[in-house]
Image: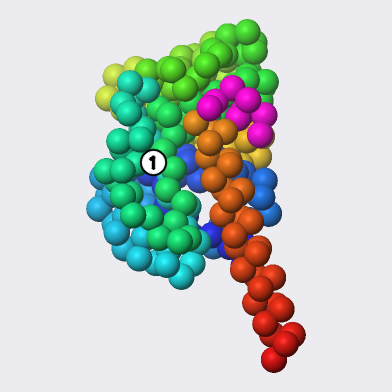
Amino acid sequence: MNQVMVAVEGISDEGAVRSILREFNLTVHLTLGRNGKAALLSKISAYNDSAKYMPWFVLVDLDSPDTCIVEKLRQWMPNPSEYMLFRVAVSELEAWLLADREAIAQFLGVSVDRVPRNPDSLKDPKQEIINLARRSRRREIREGLVPRQGSGVAIGPTYASDIRNFGESMWRPKVAAEESPSLSRCLRRVEELANKLYKNTDALKDHLRET
């Protein structure tokens, strides 16, 4: 059993989640959510009930590095089921993406020296990516990720899909974890879940051989 149910705040998060799971030979069975944090959290009890029987990976943003992550974990997921992996990105998933400085610099078409270190401490990692995109040598990045003046929106027209694709195809979770403590903790928890799943699979195989 290597397939995992996933719930995320938005489509831009999907690629990175796939890359994280892939590091431990896990794959996505189905992705739910994609309608923001409030909608995701409103269904968290149902997801947790399902996680009594099948593996789940639910990811939300902390939104502020000054918020206590332990308190939020207790508030949002006080009693996780056996197969529930509930993680919080500090302060947004974009901070984890920025932590792979070489990959994000290549993707955005900027010098790696412009990519900040210690991304977990950033107040607004998404805005940091947009600001870097403004300096991009690539027109498609500037026009896709940066919101058009007067549009009234916070991100460019292809931001979500471009970030999703970067997270899945270019971003390296284990490299990024060296710059992001919150991502490093997440990878440890995913590894624990993978070990549990493969152990249970081996136990099932042994049982079938004995019967």
Q: Residues within 10 Å of mark 1 (few under 14, many from 20)?
A: many
Left/right of residue 36 with respect to residue 58 in the rendered view:
left
Left/right of residue 29 with respect to residue 53 in the rendered view:
right
User: Three-letter amino acid code at disc 1?
Assistant: Val
Q: Where residue 34 sits in the image (x, y, percent)?
A: 38, 48
Looking at the rendering, which quadrant does residue 89 occupy?
Answer: top left
Identity of the residue drawn at 66% across and 50% down: 24
Q: Where residue 146 sits in the image (x, y, percent)?
A: 44, 22
Using the image as rendered, state which of residue 178 and residue 146 is in the foreground. 178
Count of numbered tags = 1
Q: Where residue 206 sits in the image (x, y, percent)?
A: 71, 78
State which quarter of the image contains the C terminus.
bottom right
Using the image as rendered, state which of residue 65 and residue 152 is in the foreground. 65
Identity of the residue drawn at 35% across and 35% down: 70
Identity of the residue drawn at 31% across and 37% down: 72
Q: Which residue is mark 1?
A: 60
Identity of the residue drawn at 62% across and 28% down: 176
Find the magenta span and give its range. 174-181
